[in-house]
């Protein structure tokens, strides 16, 4: 049996207070409009591709420097880098899978996460529907990764907070709901409330019997 693990993290609401899209929009001065779009998306009135069709024109002119600034100032949960480093030190794998833009999530690689997966979209450019992630995509990416690493679903621990994590939580047995509402918490094997990712990570390790 494989001796390693794959830890899968959602980003928005799990590692980050709020969403990357809202923090980017606040920086670009279009937060009111994107709040409306995100609320409509949450109600199911706007699809995943349409969300970016509406948001991306508002981000025209977004630069790498802007993204760096938003990333640095974003309200991250505590001890993210420490968790990623511990996972790597144990010879295990970590992945961040998010519906938010890859150009934001990929900056987490500097903190030690093994891989990042997000929407391949760019400010001011129409989205390619095939490059926009959905909740079901999280399961597909998990399956690709466990095949790549020679693992099984039982070797995975997922950490998430929202409806976008439901398909993944329905698929895996080791799941930690992080500051999540009842809709996800009721599916989770364990729960964590707080701002210390290390504590949520220890709960996940205990679920997998790998403390």
Image (cartoon, rainbow, N blue to C red):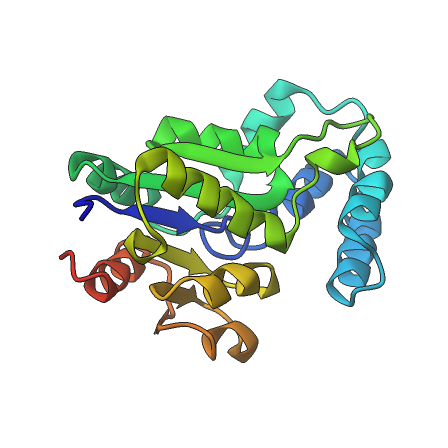
Q: Position of residue 46 (x, y in %)?
A: 83, 56
State the quadrant of the C terminus: bottom left
Left or right: where does residue 64 sit relative to residue 154? right
Which residue is found at the position 20% from the left and 45% from the top?
Answer: 2
For residue 116, above or below residue 10: above
Residue 92: quarter of image: top left
Q: Nearer the viewer, residue 4 or 76?
A: 4
Q: Nearer the viewer, residue 144 or 183?
A: 144
- Could one spot residue 21 in this view of the protein? yes
Left or right: where does residue 146 sit relative to residue 4? right
- Could one spot residue 81 in this view of the protein? no
Q: Position of residue 155 (x, y in %)?
A: 28, 52
- Outermost residue to the left: 211
Which residue is found at the position 24% from the left and 41% from the top?
Answer: 87
The number of callouts visible is 0
Left or right: where does residue 92 sit relative to residue 169? left
Which residue is found at the position 38% from the left and 34% from the top?
Answer: 148
For residue 184, above or below residue 107: below
Q: Nearer the viewer, residue 174 or 149?
A: 149
Q: Position of residue 68 (x, y in %)?
A: 55, 26
Left or right: where does residue 160 sit relative to residue 92? right
């Amino acid at each position: 049996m494989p001796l390693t693990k794959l830890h899968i993290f959602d980003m928005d609401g799990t590692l980050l207070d709020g969403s990357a899209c809202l923090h980017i929009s606040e920086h670009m001065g279009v937060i009111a409009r994107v709040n409306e779009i995100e609320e409509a998306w949450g109600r199911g009135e706007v699809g995943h591709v349409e969300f970016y069709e509406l948001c991306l024109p508002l981000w025209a002119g977004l630069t790498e420097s802007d993204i760096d600034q938003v990333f640095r100032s974003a309200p991250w949960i505590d001890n993210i880098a420490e968790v990623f480093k511990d996972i790597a030190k144990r010879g295990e794998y970590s992945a961040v899978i998010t519906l938010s833009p890859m150009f934001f999530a990929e900056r987490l690689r500097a903190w030690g996460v093994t891989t990042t997966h997000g929407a391949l979209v760019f400010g001011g450019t129409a989205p390619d529907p095939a490059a926009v992630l959905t909740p079901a995509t999280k399961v597909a990416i998990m399956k690709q990764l466990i095949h790549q690493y020679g693992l099984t679903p039982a070797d995975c621990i997922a950490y998430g907070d929202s409806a976008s994590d439901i398909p993944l939580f329905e698929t895996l047995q080791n799941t930690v709901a992080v500051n999540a509402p009842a809709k996800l918490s009721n599916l989770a094997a364990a729960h964590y409330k707080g701002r210390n990712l290390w504590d949520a990570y220890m709960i996940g390790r205990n679920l997998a019997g790998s403390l």
